[in-house]
Image (cartoon, rainbow, N blue to C red):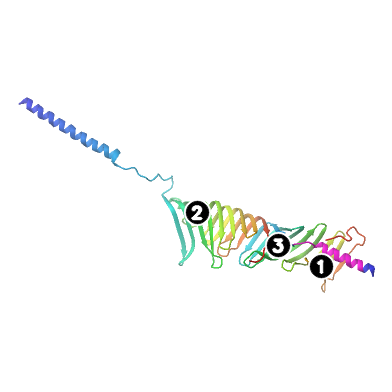
Amino acid sequence: MNNFNNIKRFLGLVAIVASLLVVGTILLRMDHGMVPKLPVRKLPLQVDISLQKFHYTETKQGVKRWDLAAEKAEYNKKKDLTSLATVRLTVAGAAKFGDLVITADRALYHNGTRDVVLSGNVTGVSSKGLRFSASNLSYLASRSLLVSEERVRFSDGGNELEGVGMEFQTQTRRFKLKKDVSAVFRQQEAR
Amino acid sequence: MRSVFCQLILLLLLVSGAVAAPISGNEPLKVKSDNLTADNEKKTATFEGKVVAHQGELTLYTDRLVVSSAGDGNELSKVEAFGNVRILQGIRQATGGHAVYDPKRGVILLDGNPRVVVGDDVVTGKVITYFINEQRSIVTGGPKERVEAVIHPGGKNVGAKP
């Protein structure tokens, strides 16, 4: 009788150990093997949202004012700033002037003011053929103004202009070069 | 009579030489200044502050230079200088308060007490007009500004070519 009780206790112990092993194995597998790894890379510090193929259009009373596109955008909520890479800013001008397309390697978009600070190989081309280039350029949205404190080079047909510091009014296409100006005009026949 | 004739010849050489071979041909017009304002609608570029313009052998200094173009292209239609205009070509110098160059007509008009100096020789009037293609100049007097010429016959500049 005593032996029978010992066998029952032993089998009960084996059953408990086996149950614990099964539960342990399941938990271990769930912890390491069953949960898939996230495919998204960690965001850089101070970046809250990262977007690919960013596209933003600003309109006023149903009329497009400007259009900002980038290959990549990273939003920093704390600074309310969006860092953009491979940027294309299209500023709509008056009907007779057409659009002005500005490309750059990088840009910072200030969400509050809606200003855009472009840097790295900044190049602008108007629909009338006016071209300009600079290392840095800012678009002040409220004044429809492009400004730069750097050297800016213009070309229009065979004519060339350059100077340090620029203010370019995108609606009227009037611009100022602030200092150290040089220009070359080549006489051309009317088209 | 011969003396008067010689003086007229000298006057002609002096004036035409002073502004000869100016903004002509297909030479590019090169401009330097402190600042620039460009108006795409008016098709003007206004250079201000220590303006220096070169074309060929000609150099122009002024306070303000307005370059105008016409049509859809970049054809220069007018170049106008305002304030302390000084045009140099070799030893010749023309000065005035205002100058206008019309590339289509090939004419430079200098006014605002225009004065042409070659060495010691001086010609003044109300307006000096130079026709580039003909290399011909007209010095015009006014009610208050008569044409005046101070010529030094036999001087080292006699017969100086443009």
Q: Quadrant of residue B43?
A: bottom right
In the rendered view of the protein, which quadrant contains the C terminus of chain B? bottom right
Q: Amino acid at mark 2?
A: Val
Mark 3 nearby-residue class (10 Å; few <14, some 14–19, many ≥20): many
Tag 3's secondary structure? strand
Q: Are marks 1 and 2 in contact (CB under 8 Å)?
A: no
Residue A10 position within the rendered picture, expressed as x and y whole percent measured from the top left = 13, 28
Chain under label 1? B
Q: Are marks 2 and 3 on the same chain?
A: no
Q: What whole-number distance in Å separates the C-alpha atoms at marks 2 and 3?
A: 38 Å
Chain under label 2? A
Residue B26 position within the rendered picture, expressed as x and y whole percent measured from the top left = 72, 61
Which stretch is magenta? Answer: B5-23
Q: Are marks 3 and 1 on the same chain?
A: yes
The residue under label 2 is A87
Q: Is residue A46 left or right of residue B126?
A: left
Residue B82 position within the rendered picture, expressed as x and y whole percent measured from the top left = 72, 64
The residue under label 1 is B137
Q: Which mark is residue B64?
A: 3
Q: Amino acid at mark 1?
A: Ser
- Of circles 3 and 1, the one toward us is 1
Q: Quadrant of residue B98?
A: bottom right
Mark 1 nearby-residue class (10 Å; few <14, some 14–19, many ≥20): many
Q: Earlier in the sequence, mark 3 or mark 1?
A: 3
Q: Are marks 2 and 3 in contact (CB under 8 Å)?
A: no
Taking A98 as reference, is A26 above or below it? above
Residue at 24%, 38% in the rendered image: A26
Q: Is residue B89 left or right of residue A100?
A: right
Q: Is residue B42 left or right of residue A13?
A: right
Magenta stretch, overall SS: helix
Tag 1's secondary structure? strand
